[in-house]
Amino acid sequence: MNKYLISQLLTLLLLLFLVACNNEETPWEEPTVEIGHLTSVIAESSYEKEELAAMVVDFVAAQGVNLPVDFVTLLMCDVEVAAIEYTTTGADGSPITASGVIAMPQGTTSYDHLVSIQHGTLNMEEAPSQQLFYYEMLPVIRGHIIVMADYIGYGSSQTPDRQHPYLHNQLTGTTCADMIEAAREYLQQKSLTETSDAVELMGYSQGGQASMATLLELEKRGLAESVRAVYAGGGPYDLESILQTFLSYQDNPMPYARTGYAPYLIRGMVYGEQLSVSDENLYAPAVIEEGLNEMFSTQPLSEWHEALGTDITQVIHPDFFAAPAFNGNADVVAVIEALRKNSLINSSVPPQVPVYLYHSPQDDFVPYSNAVNAHNLWSSSTLTDLSMPGHVLGGVEFMLRYMGLWELVGPMLVP
């Protein structure tokens, strides 16, 4: 019998027992909200393989790679998708409604595992539940049932001030772990048979970090035995080193126009840790004087980069560059401590399940050292170097490797 049904039956029997043993009339109390439970189905749809093939061809074309659409179509299958809402825990510890997506090959009637894919960094308007099918869900074509959370601040949990606990371990792991449970409930409602509670965790970039955070949460819940393995590519596991990468460009322009990630990371720590800090102590005077910090609460992340320019010294407060005391700036110190706390390499309990790390030594977004340092600390891990240059194309290779298609498709991508 399904674990959820057993739990519900035991709860009902306990309530009946308590009522039978208590003759006094007592006022009815609202039941406690159960975290991780499905609350509603937002939308259900389907995609034909030709639609998915066109999506893939368009995406890789934007990266300067051309693939024949007929060939890609042969690799696809028709897919069913559903966007759902469920309950998870917010940054202040209270229950909130979050959202995510489930995808499965059309005609699926049973499953022996789920693949929880944690997506990379997106604009909030690009939440997977709003797209219904996001390209990182493509492993569905290999027969998997895919589960993908939106993350807090995306989809149904988006806030007016656009707060997202970017790279915050606990909130990320909790949100994704709760999505897995909600997905099981949805599949049960659709009368799919679960023959095993096995899970694989997979993700690239922010998704790589989120996959490891989800593993830690599942281990905390005593569910490590259900995790077959983690496949994490191009992930930021050492957040302090990520900040140091930004700081290293104080004398030179950024090598890529993505300075917006610095305030996104700072805001993620501030929101996730619920820190009481002021923008004036965290961002460069030019940002405050020009009111650019207001953009952080009103505009998509993709618009921050151009507005902030490529000079990191004109983005974050000068005290960030004054380690180790940071000129006594308590707000900067609080952010640095939050980064250390949320760095996965600082976790007191190393992962116990197989972890397959992938990273390109030529990654221009997330330093390769993140993977090397994590691999040295996690005895259950292996590290595979990706051959494609840059962060984005490295992600394409990572996904193809996970799907077992790299040997077939890779030669078409490599110059």
Image: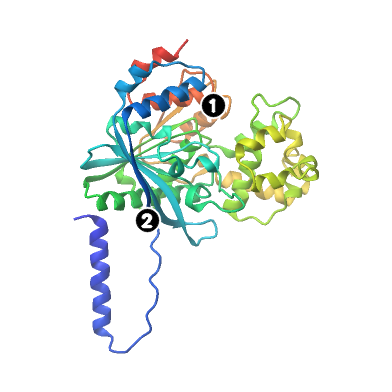
Quarter the N terminus occupies: bottom left
Up the image or down, 300 lies above or below 56; here it is below
The picture places residue 36, in percent across and down from the top left corner, at 38, 56
**Residue 368: assigned label:** 1
Up the image or down, 409 lies above or below 59; here it is above
User: Which image quarter: residue 16?
Assistant: bottom left
| Of 345 and 66, the residue lying toward us | 66
| Of 190 and 256, the residue lying toward us | 190
- Is residue 169 shown left or right of residue 75? right
- For mark 1, give the secondary structure: loop
Q: Residues within 10 Å of mark 2 (few under 14, many from 20)?
A: some
> Mark 2 sits on what residue?
40
Q: Which residue is drawn at the image coordinates 54% and 43% (left, top)?
A: 124
The picture places residue 325, in percent across and down from the top left corner, at 74, 44
Mark 1 touching mark 2, by CB under 8 A? Answer: no
Q: Residues within 10 Å of mark 1 (few under 14, many from 20)?
A: some
The picture places residue 50, in percent across and down from the top left corner, at 34, 26
Amino acid carrying label 2: it is: Ser
Up the image or down, 254 lies above or below 268; here it is above
